[in-house]
Amino acid sequence: MLPYHSLPEAQAALGRNLTFAETLWFNYSATKSDYFLYCHNILFLFLIFSVVPLPMIFLEVKRFGGLDKYKIQPKVRLSFLEMFRCYKEVMRLFFLVVGPLQLVSYPAVKMIGVRTGLPLPSGWEIFAQLVVYFLIEDFTNYWFHRLLHGKWGYEKIHRVHHEYSAPIGFAAPYAHWAEILILGIPSFLGPAMIPGHMITLWLWIALRQIEAIDTHSGYDIPWSPTKYIPFYAGAEHHDYHHYVGGQSQSNFASVFTYCDYIYGTDKGYRYRKNMIRKLKETKNGVEQNGREDEKYE
Ligand SMILES: [Zn+2]
Ligand SMILES: [Zn+2]
């Protein structure tokens, strides 16, 4: 809740006119509690889990010719009912684990100093913080995920996430409840180390989920805007991790490729990629835009 009762009061406190974005924020948030603003994350997560995977799910069902060739594992096809079962399971997790986790984590969010007031951060400040959050998430998630591939961690917890050897967008948060708690830590670390505005936190939670849905989509679209993000792992990188399954010692990172490169856990993936590229070149001549989906066949 903002400590001003009117726009002139807010302007007087800031010593300047409010920007357009600040006026919008004032009008929206002035009478709402910080807790209520934080709980918006629950609505955003519900919408993101429900809506963002839909285009690729639709593609999986309809198999449009022009895009179907980008399916990474074309031999594995899930029916609509199988995908809906995954969605129902994710929604169950959402109501029993993710939502309550958001509700009870508010004191921690308050303690680290996430603010809701004015002035709003600049676009560059938000961007810089989000980049740092992604870097911290990626590094920490790499090691937590790698530990979950130990014998005990895999059999007791992480095995559930690997039920989908050819993932779909809905399967991004499909996991044991303990994994959701464990891998919530890397997501929380960035905002805890560099606390920002509530709007930055909303964006962070939303973008992290959208990124996870993208890497589990099962499609590697060559003209996706994410191809312009340096070191972005994307669907193909993580799909290989699911393809190899429980024995996987490859491609642990959640966002970028460099951790797997530095720690040598992408050797099998790169070797296989190179081998298949060479085979294709031998077979068909140099094929710059060959079907990525043939790499696992
Ligand atoms: Zn794994
Ligand atoms: Zn996964």
Image (cartoon, rainbow, N blue to C red):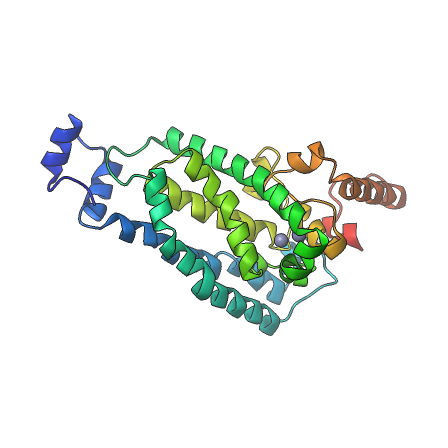
Residue most toward the front?
A: 152
How many numbered marks does the figure carry? 0
Res 111 seen here: yes
In-front residue for pair 105/205? 105
Above or below residue 166? Residue 114 is above
**Left or right, residue 177 beside residue 28:** right
Rendered location of residue 110, percent (x, y): 32, 43
- At x 63%, y 42%, the residue is 143
- At x 72%, y 55%, the residue is 151
- At x 41%, y 60%, the residue is 99
**Left or right, residue 271 beside residue 50:** right
Residue most toward the bottom?
A: 81
Rendered location of residue 284, percent (x, y): 86, 45
Rendered location of residue 83, percent (x, y): 59, 68
Rendered location of residue 25, percent (x, y): 24, 42
In-front residue for pair 143/42? 143
